Amino acid sequence: MKGLFALLPMAFLLVSCATAAPAPCPQPTVTAPAAVAHQPLDRYERRIITAGAPAEVMALVENDTPSDDAFLREKALTVDPAEPIIGHLAARMLETVKKAPGVGIAAPQVGISRRLIWVQRMDKEEKPFEFYINPRIDEFSPEKEIGWEGCLSVPAGFGKCYRSTSITLSHDTTDNGRVSEKISGFTAVIFQHEIDHLDGVLFIDLKEQGDLMPKEAYYEMRRKEKEAKEKEQAAPAATPENK
Ligand SMILES: [Zn+2]
């Protein structure tokens, strides 16, 4: 997962505009971005990106070797939103996160230390993956909740982290704009996890307690939870006759 391999949605974290009360979803606001000089992608970065077709997955960088761990700890550079090769990289990153499967991925996880992420918008009806250029969290809610997290770049397992329940996100657009949006629930957790990657931070730096749970044990726990829930839902409703 590097990435966010397995940020599995916790029911209590899920917030959906479709199911939440009558208030309409907040609309993104668009402003002109500050003038920033972006460092062009170098030859090495271009070679990694174009080593495969847009439909080809990329190799994941995992934290289980010292050199890959050091790479994941770098602060990623911004990128010019008009840079044409971004489309090729975005396509390959999307193939990679879908195959993993994960709910988000950051460019450093595929060997490109640039501020680019895909996030699955669990707060939108079709749960689409969306791509963000130079994303930044401008505000974190003081309210936090704890939940399980895993990562495509951390093969050792899953752990619990506290994350803000809502954030204000801003990011560049390809037509030279900057969009700001308030995001809540599990999707806000995914953004926090992915944007941490751009600053060299992994969820294991934040995890609250104990050792990581190995992936197999985690999946088994989730499977049992799901089974128990299905059993509960299938049970006949209590009536005077069957009480
Ligand atoms: Zn991750």
Image (cartoon, grey):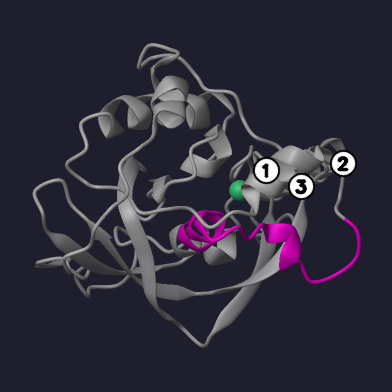
Q: How far apart are marks 2 and 3 (CA)?
A: 17 Å
Q: Is residue 193 magenta?
A: yes
Q: Find residue 24 and report its horizontal and vertical position in percent.
A: 19, 70
Of the image marks 2 and 1, the number of the one nearer the N terminus: 2
Residues under numbered marks 2 and 3 in contact, where contact means CB atoms less than 8 Å apart = no
Q: How far apart are marks 2 and 1 (CA)?
A: 20 Å
Q: Element type at marker 2?
A: helix
Name the residue: 50% across, 74% down. 165
Is disc 2 surrounded by few (<14), some (14 to 19) or many (20+) residues within 10 Å? Answer: few
Q: In this view, does 86 lie above or below 176?
A: above
The one of 145 and 22 positioned closer to us in this rendering = 145
Cβ(mark 1) to ligand 1 < 8 Å?
A: no
The one of 7 and 91 positioned closer to us in this rendering = 91
Residues under numbered marks 3 and 1 in contact, where contact means CB atoms less than 8 Å apart = yes
Instruction: Give amino acid for label 2.
Output: Ala
Q: Element type at marker 3?
A: helix
Residue occupied by mark 1: 230
Image quadrant of residue 31?
bottom left
Of the image marks 2 and 3, the number of the one nearer the N terminus: 2
Q: Distance between the residues labelled 3 and 1?
A: 5 Å
Q: Find residue 209 and report its horizontal and vertical position in percent.
A: 85, 70
Name the residue: 74% across, 39% down. 67
Q: Quadrant of the N terminus?
A: top right
Residue 228's label in the rendered image is 3
Residue stretch in magenta: 190-211
Q: Find residue 7 and report its horizontal and vertical position in percent.
A: 61, 49
Name the residue: 51% across, 54% down. 194
Residue occupied by mark 2: 217
Q: Is residue 187 magenta?
A: no
